[in-house]
Image (spheres, rainbow, N blue to C red):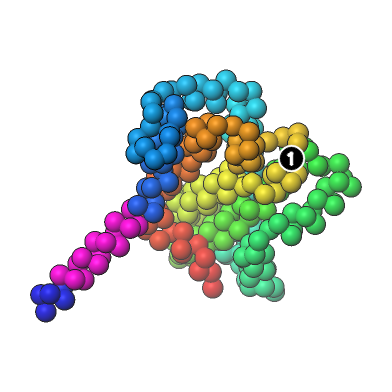
Amino acid sequence: MNARRALREIGIGALAIALMAFILGPILWLGAHAFATSWTFPRLSADGWTTHWWHEVFADSALAGAIRTSLLITPVVVLISAVICLPAAYAIGRHSFPGRRLFLIGMFAANAFPKIGLFASLAALFYAMNLMGTVIGIVIVQLLGTIVFMTWIPASAFAAVPRSLEEAARDAGASRLTVFRTITLRLAMPSILVAVIMSFLASFDEAQGSYLVGAPNIYTMPTEMYALVENYPIQVAAVFSILLSVPSVILIGLARQHIIGGRLAEGFQIR
């Protein structure tokens, strides 16, 4: 019995080490190459260390421009997504109407398949509307990836607000706006913040549609990675990859409590 227990603990430990290597390995590889002057195979360490590649990334107008573009476009996409989707989420969560479930299933199903076919179809429409190579075109494309998060998660949060609390506040003389602001919105706000963070990450990391619509005039950080792989030293690509992952790490860290607490999973459980 002890031998079996020891083998199980060894197996769990080995699995944990393998998972850590799988998750942390690429990050450590990027970190090492971002500061390496060069790395000659089969040496186990870099030939030397430098911060030159970091200076080169920020000094390069194309790379710095891609960073600025992503940091400007992504908040705009999230804001527009919130303005469009949060009223719809409230209606879905608080009211029952014909076609409600079909709408939810259709929206989720549209995001369950590769979007490259959808982007190719949109390209023809964008050409006709002169949206190719424009910021507006990129914003529209990135909105497609945020709608499911900004609708499903808040809709579930609005649906979970006890109606008895709202009715009690109304009986006490509070107006509909006051009830919504102080009870409904306050209780749903943690899930809404999770939806905002997930939408930000979906927009910030979107590459296929942004490249198809924006190139060769406008490049975001993910689309600039294509040029980095082909035209820049591997150290520059490592630095840029780290910069690309920083917002994801920070935002996931901020939302960690609510994601681990189940708010993200609860957001997809609308009855």
Up/down of 222 relative to 15, above or below: above
Residue 159: horizontal and vertical position, in percent?
52, 64
Question: Outermost residue, left direction?
Answer: 2
Which quadrant does the C terminus fall into? Answer: bottom right
Q: Is residue 86 left or right of residue 8?
A: right
Up/down of 221 relative to 171, above or below: above
Decide if residue 243 is in sight here. Answer: no
Mark 1 burial class by Cα count in 10 Å: few <14, some 14-19, many 20+: many
Give the quarter of the image for residue 226. top right
Q: Is residue 23 left or right of residue 69?
A: left
Residue marked by disc 1: 214
Residue 79: horizontal and vertical position, in percent?
62, 42
Camera-side residue of 205 and 186: 205
Question: Outermost residue, front direction?
Answer: 42
- Residue located at (46% from left, 64% from top): 266
- Residue located at (35% from left, 57% from top): 19
Inspect the magenta stretch and tell me whether residue 113 lies in it: no
Residue 78: horizontal and vertical position, in percent?
61, 44
Dominant secondary structure of the residues highlighted in magenta in the image: helix
Q: Secondary structure at mark 1?
A: helix
Which quadrant does the N terminus fall into? Answer: bottom left
Magenta stretch: give its range.
6-20
- Residue located at (53% from left, 69% from top): 270
Decide if residue 200 is in sight here. Answer: yes
Residue 252: horizontal and vertical position, in percent?
43, 47
Up/down of 122 relative to 97, above or below: above
The amino acid type of the residue labelled 1 equals Gly
